[in-house]
Image: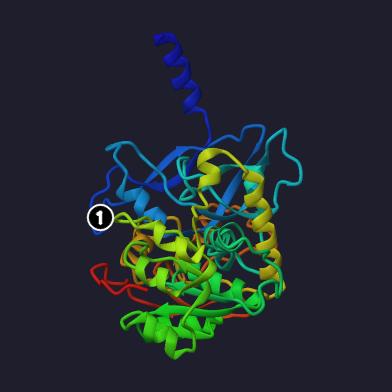
Amino acid sequence: MAFKSVIESISDHFRPKMDAVGVTHNGLLQADDAFIERSVNQPQPKEDELLVQVLASSVNPVDVKMRAGYQDKGVFRIFGLDVVGRVAAVGSAVSGFEVGERVFYVGKQHHAGADAAYQVINAKMVAKAPEKLDDVSAAAMPLTSVTAYDILEHGFHLSVKQDAAKGKTLFIINGAGGVGSVLIQLAKYMGMTVLATAGNHDSKAWVKRQGADHVLDYHKSLVAEARDAGYTEVDYIADLQDTTAYWDLMVQLIRPYGEIASIVDTTLPVDLGELKAKSAGFSWIFMLARGNNNIYLEKQGEILQAIAKLLDDGSIRSTVTKVYHGLSAYSIRSAFQDVAGHHAIGKVVVDFAPNIKAAHENLGPGADQESKLGDGPDDVQEHNGQAKKTGKSPLNDENDTTRY
């Protein structure tokens, strides 16, 4: 046994290394060691996997929840689910991908994450990245796009095609977040009338930019707000905020034979029986269920392929609103702080290009270039579906309790 351990130790010493950012505890995000940088073994792809050089990754609320739930104190854990990267190696059983191709995907929740120079991923879960979007713009899209797609297809039983739901109405609770921002765009592509909630001036303006027909102020009575917009009932409701808090509202607003879908856990029991009189349906949507249960993995790749096409033809646009530069503890911690503060509009992305350029690795044609704005955050504005950097912006206050 000891001899085996020595052999494994020697073998481990000669394995290629990579930079990674992760955690060893789940303490306060303000702490200097909330995230740390380490050199770790570079993963090697199995026969059905790709080795991907990560070019950019975004932070989602589920990443924050995963960190909060981390319990293996002292064990280095890497988070990160959204990826845009380049294929560095292809498993022996994989077809359809070549070394050097740019891809995007959502990783598995319980595997080593994307906040590293390289990651391995089952090839079925991957699609070729949108050709017309840079790395940062594309990195904002995988998890939220697949979630929005699942709401429409799995939750509402609709076909995500142009004008496929023309004349139908969709009520979105939390329209300014990552999922809401994509869902508004997909619903408008399908011909739906969209009512979406938002809080302050900036989030309302953002929701309107995504295409919402009616922006409702969640500080007021949403039933009254919907009525003032001309709707006492709607065909579909997407709850992206709080299932328990909005349950009575959803029961009241859903039309007979309508559908409700939620991505948010209940904090108290809700009475599904209240939907029986309307013969209305309710569905849970959790896009990570495929990876967690190792089932229907190819469906994720198919959805991302469809999303890439919609992004390339301009039917939907990237939802990135803030960018941090460099794979560093500072960048990852700052992005997590933004998302944990519950007031990020759209998506927060970390661009790994400075690290890759510093290591003299070739990003390849069409890839993002090293930022000239340093390693701090940028405000970004959308321009033809791309993330256009406009200057520095301060870190958000994590204690801000404003919700979108």
Between 180 and 77, the one lying in front of the other is 180
Residue 268 screen position, x and y as percent:
29, 56
* In the image, farthest residue toward the right: 96
* Left or right side of 350 for 221: left
Residue 24 screen position, x and y as percent:
30, 42
* Left or right side of 86 for 257: left
**Amino acid marked by disc 1:** Asp
Instruction: Specify few, some or many for label 1: CA neighbours under 10 Å numbering under 14, 14-19, or 20 or more.
Output: few
* In the image, farthest residue toward the front: 277
* Left or right side of 380 for 101: right
Residue at point 35%, 83% (across, down): 200
Q: In which quadrant will I find the C terminus?
A: bottom left
Here the colouring is rainbow
Residue at point 47%, 41% (across, down): 112
Between 404 and 166, the one lying in front of the other is 166
* Quarter residue 139 falls in: bottom right
**Dot 1: element:** loop
Residue 151 screen position, x and y as percent:
55, 61
Residue at point 65%, 54% (across, down): 103
The residue to which callout 1 is attached is 32
Is residue 11 shown above or below 378? Answer: above
* Quarter residue 310 falls in: bottom right
